[in-house]
Each structure stands twice: as C-alpha cells, then as structure tokens.
C-alpha cells in the first residue's frame, strides 16, 4: 500500500507563491468559521448568561413574549 502512495508523491515542490495563496485561503476560511461561530453558538451562550444574570430563565422570557403578542 505504501508503494501506491509513493506513486502519488509529487516530483517537484510547489512554488512559494502557490503555498502562500493556499495558506492565505486557509486563514480566511478559519476567520470565517470563527465569525460564524461567534454569531451562532457563542451568541446563544452569551444571551443565556446575560438573562441568567438578571434572574430570568427561558420560561420567563417566553411568558413575556407571549403576553406581548396577546396585547397586540
């Protein structure tokens, strides 16, 4: 099996410009993943912590939302 992979090994090294472009693309993807994580999972955790600081839980918040909708 190792012989099969050795056949796939490149004979030449990639140019430095190509390596830089690939690593820049990977860094950009990592940054995008961090931003998405910030506005999805971490946002929910932050919101939960904020509401718990004021002694409210999700049931209390749902009741307030429900009461506001009924008043409309």
Image (cartoon, rainbow, N blue to C red):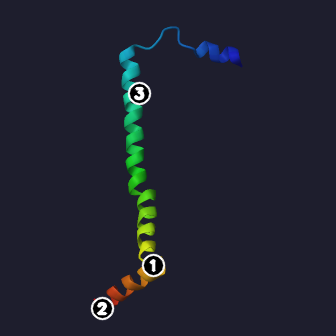
For the C terminus, give its image quadrant: bottom left
Q: Helix or strand or loop: what does disc 2 sit on?
A: helix
- Mark in the foreground, 2 or 1: 1
Q: Helix or strand or loop: what does disc 3 sit on?
A: helix
Q: Is residue 46 above or below residue 19?
A: below
State the CA–CA distance, disc 1 to disc 3. Answer: 46 Å
Q: Residue drawn at (40%, 26%), measured in percent from left and top?
A: 22
Q: Is residue 72 left or right of residue 56?
A: left
Picture quarter containing residue 9? top right
Q: Read off the residue under disc 3.
A: 23
Q: Residue drawn at (45%, 68%), measured in percent from left and top?
A: 48
Q: Are marks 1 and 3 in contact (CB under 8 Å)?
A: no
Q: Residue drawn at (38%, 31%), measured in percent from left and top?
A: 25
Lower sequence index among marks 2 and 1: 1
Lower sequence index among marks 3 and 2: 3
Badge 1, how many Cα within 10 Å: few under 14, some, many 20+? few
Q: Read off the residue under disc 1.
A: 55
Looking at the image, the residue that sits furthest to the top is 11
Lower sequence index among marks 1 and 3: 3
Looking at the image, the residue that sits furthest to the left is 72
Report x, y in % for residue 2.
69, 17
Q: Residue drawn at (41%, 69%), measured in percent from left and top?
A: 50
- Mark in the foreground, 1 or 3: 1
Picture quarter containing residue 68? bottom left
Report x, y in % for residue 63.
42, 85
Q: Read off the residue under disc 2.
A: 71
For the N terminus, give its image quadrant: top right
Q: Nearer the viewer, residue 63 or 51?
A: 51
Q: Is residue 70 left or right of residue 59?
A: left
Report x, y in % for residue 58.
47, 77
């Amino acid at each position: 099996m190792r012989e099969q992979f050795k056949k796939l090994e490149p004979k030449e090294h990639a140019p430095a410009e190509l390596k830089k472009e690939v690593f820049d693309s990977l860094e950009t993807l990592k940054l995008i993943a961090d931003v998405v994580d910030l506005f999805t999972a971490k946002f929910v955790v932050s919101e939960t912590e904020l509401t718990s600081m004021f002694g409210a839980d999700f049931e209390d918040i749902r009741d307030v939302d429900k009461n506001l909708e009924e008043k409309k």
